[in-house]
Image (tube, helix red, strand yellow):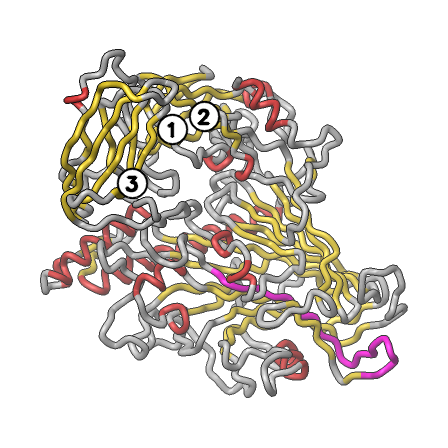
């Protein structure tokens, strides 16, 4: 069966090297590293898509935190989403339209506030390119094809420089095509960034037909702008319960001064004391456990910009400006008084790094800060970070290219949880200074709120280190040493344990850069309760075998797995850490369906041994089933039976048919009308049956206490 299912999965891909299609997709997502991101056929990520499309995949970091339902936090948005919109603007002055009418200026607005995929930013195509076929994942005969669903036009390209690439082309009403290529990597030094290469070409075509409506157009005073709207951990903003995501972002630009080693426009979460004076919410502490939910720093790092459409060398003076703008003053065709002329002015009239923009250009340059008393606080609704380039002249057919990195980094989740809980305990105890932290680099000790700020600010250092790595990557032609691909994974419930096996493809696949076999072994990881927790994964096997029988899973507990391959480091002779052994991404084959250690039913079951676990049930008991807090397990059942749950007055709450032949059956405390039961005393009745559903003599009646 396992081999048949693997062939079924492999059959999803065409031998021609083009992946089979799923019609109608207008986006593609990366979900292979610690940063997950989504790109659209229109090149932009308009804010409206945030509500209509897979919002969870837009700059998710750390990837896979709280991504399953029911969501751990109970918040509307399940994961740490760190951005909600992006845009490209293309402006020229003067400009002549297809009717010969001359405009003082024109701007193609490709998001973020407004987009028009029929007349302004017209998608030509979008596709994802894979260097290798993703592995198959099977759990109890269910093929998890949703891990990497092939889309229309997707393809395999063995010589691809990255693990995956998303490419799209967009046609604009100014007669300039956008060709955007985004690169994602599983090398752990680079998996928290997406490298974006964008080429703007003066085609003169403003729609999808072959006629050049603006043939031979020469564009003058051309400006290009890219923007990103940060929402540092949407999960954290909603947990705090204020207008947090509106006015609590802070921003800064590094790279304007001579001698700066890199360029980075970045944002983070702070404490807006004017917006919520009674709540100290730096880092967005979880109100229940104190964990700081917004510990990320998000950045745009401009790395390359052609000097001009005729000079492909990097322009050290670019970008021309780095500005933030809030929702109120954001130039847009849809905003009264903020039309095309204001968009063009935004790109062309105020060269600076960094400044806010309200249309006048009079606000001061910022120099740093951590809260609303500092100049980095924007006191505006929905901050967007813009980098602008120009002016250029573009002859027909000429193009201009720029490359930037989208990066997220910050304090790791385990430290956010540990320090957050300790700080909450100190604050709740009435003395915040009981909380202290010593900087491991400087040896300086901080206490109270200052200690909290200093811990969170270490995320800035991590972001800058990542920006330096992104620059290294681009300067090395987008190439870095590559870890192996993960094997296909097969997981089956079994009596006494869980049977896991995996393919041997990594051992037979040479390094993509050198063509030399450098496989060393496999590692198998398990997590109990949920697959979507960043912490909690345990390595349970390392070696060269292709199977493992896991007997160390608690009865009734859900188990999730992934299996990686790692190389011997001999082919990784350069890069950030030459000679380092590299391990494949956990996301290639992470199981998103649970497996359970089966306990067989007795041949002659003793009905008196049947019991629900836990009983009594208390929703606040930390010993409930991990990740399945509402689960009650009936144990020592006959292989086939009917479980009926009643209220104390005899009303039927739920009927469960147990027909899998094992000794266990779970109940999620939902009624037959899909509502959670309330606290109280319930009765249960177990009626033994044979394999054909006929009643047998065995019965059990018992009580169950539920406290919710």
Q: Can you say whether 516 is above or below 169 in the image?
A: above
Residue underneath mark 1: 595
In magenta segment, residue 93: yes
Residue 58 x, y percent position in the rendering: 51, 55
Q: Can you say whether 289 is above or below 328 in the image?
A: above
Decide which of tag 1 and tag 2 comes sooner along the chain.
2
Residue underneath mark 2: 140
Q: Please, what secondary structure does the residue beneath circle 1 have?
A: loop
Whether the residues at callouts 1 and 2 have beta carbons within 8 Å, the answer is yes
| Segment tinted magenta in the rendering | 83-102
Whether the residues at callouts 3 and 1 have beta carbons within 8 Å, the answer is no
Q: Please, what secondary structure does the residue beneath circle 2 have?
A: loop
Residue 119 x, y percent position in the rendering: 74, 69
Report if residue 244 is visible in the image.
Answer: yes
Decide which of tag 3 and tag 2 comes sooner along the chain.
2
Instruction: Give the residue displayed 77% in from the left and 65% down from the top.
Output: 176
Residue 86: assigned label: none
Residue underneath mark 3: 654
Judge depth for marks 3 and 1 and give the one in front. Answer: 3
């Amino acid at each position: 069966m396992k081999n048949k299912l693997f062939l079924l999965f492999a059959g999803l891909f065409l031998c021609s090297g083009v992946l089979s299609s799923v019609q109608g997709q207008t986006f593609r997502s990366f979900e292979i590293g610690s940063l997950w991101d989504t790109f659209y056929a229109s090149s932009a990520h308009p804010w409206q898509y945030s509500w209509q499309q897979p919002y969870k995949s837009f700059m998710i970091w750390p990837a896979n935190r709280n991504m399953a339902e029911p969501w751990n936090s109970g918040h509307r948005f399940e994961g740490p989403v760190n951005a909600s919109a992006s845009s490209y603007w293309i402006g020229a002055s003067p400009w002549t339209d297809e009717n010969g009418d001359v405009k003082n200026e024109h701007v193609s607005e490709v998001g973020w506030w407004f987009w028009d995929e029929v007349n302004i930013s017209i998608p030509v195509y979008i596709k994802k390119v894979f260097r290798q076929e993703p592995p198959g994942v099977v759990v109890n005969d269910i093929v998890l094809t949703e891990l990497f669903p092939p889309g229309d036009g997707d393809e395999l390209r063995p010589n691809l420089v990255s693990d995956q690439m998303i490419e799209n082309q967009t046609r604009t009403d100014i007669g300039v095509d956008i060709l955007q290529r985004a690169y994602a990597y599983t090398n752990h030094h680079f998996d928290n960034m997406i490298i974006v290469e964008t080429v703007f070409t003066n085609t003169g075509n403003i729609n999808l037909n072959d006629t050049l409506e603006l043939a031979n157009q020469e564009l003058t005073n051309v400006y290009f702008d890219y923007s990103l709207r940060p929402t540092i951990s949407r999960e954290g903003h909603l947990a705090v319960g204020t207008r947090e995501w509106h006015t609590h972002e802070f921003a800064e630009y590094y790279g304007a001064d001579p001698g700066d080693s890199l360029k980075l426009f970045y944002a983070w979460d702070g404490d807006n004391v004017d917006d919520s004076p009674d709540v100290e919410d730096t880092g967005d502490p979880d109100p229940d456990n104190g964990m700081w939910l917004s510990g990320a720093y998000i950045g745009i790092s401009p790395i390359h910009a052609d000097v001009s459409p005729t000079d492909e060398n990097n322009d050290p003076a670019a970008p021309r400006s780095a500005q933030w703008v809030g929702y109120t003053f954001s130039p847009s065709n849809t905003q009264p008084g903020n039309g095309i002329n204001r968009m063009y002015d935004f790109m062309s009239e105020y060269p600076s790094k960094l400044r806010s923009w309200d249309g006048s250009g009079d606000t001061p340059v910022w120099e740093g800060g951590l809260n609303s008393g500092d100049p980095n606080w924007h006191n505006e609704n929905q901050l967007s970070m813009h980098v602008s380039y120009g002016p250029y002249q573009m002859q027909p057919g000429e193009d201009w290219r720029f490359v930037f990195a989208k990066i997220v980094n910050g304090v790791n989740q385990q430290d956010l949880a540990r320090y957050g809980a300790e700080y909450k305990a100190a604050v709740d105890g009435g003395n915040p200074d009981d909380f202290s932290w010593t900087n491991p680099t400087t040896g300086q000790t901080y206490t109270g709120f200052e200690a909290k700020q200093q811990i969170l600010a270490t995320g800035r250092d991590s972001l800058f280190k990542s920006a330096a790595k992104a620059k290294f990557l681009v300067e090395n032609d987008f190439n870095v040493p590559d870890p192996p691909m993960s094997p296909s994974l097969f997981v089956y419930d079994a009596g006494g344990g869980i049977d896991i096996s995996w393919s041997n493809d990594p051992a037979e696949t040479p390094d993509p850069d050198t063509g030399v076999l450098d496989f060393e072994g496999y590692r198998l990881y398990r997590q109990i309760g949920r697959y979507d927790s960043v912490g909690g994964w345990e390595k349970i096997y390392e070696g060269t075998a292709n199977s493992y029988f896991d007997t160390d899973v608690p009865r009734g507990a859900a188990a999730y797995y992934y299996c990686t391959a790692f190389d011997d480091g001999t082919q990784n002779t350069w890069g950030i850490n030459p000679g380092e052994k590299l391990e494949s991404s956990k996301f290639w084959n992470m199981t998103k369906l649970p497996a359970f250690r089966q306990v067989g039913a007795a041949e002659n079951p003793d009905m008196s041994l049947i019991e629900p676990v836990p009983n009594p049930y208390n929703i606040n008991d930390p010993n409930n089933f991990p990740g399945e807090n509402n689960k009650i397990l009936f144990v020592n059942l006959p292989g086939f039976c009917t479980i009926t749950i009643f209220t104390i007055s005899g009303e039927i709450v739920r009927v469960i048919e147990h027909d899998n032949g094992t000794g266990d059956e779970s109940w999620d405390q939902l009624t037959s009308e899909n509502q959670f039961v309330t606290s109280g005393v319930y009765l249960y009745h177990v009626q033994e049956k044979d394999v054909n559903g006929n009643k047998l003599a065995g019965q059990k009646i018992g009580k169950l206490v539920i406290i919710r």
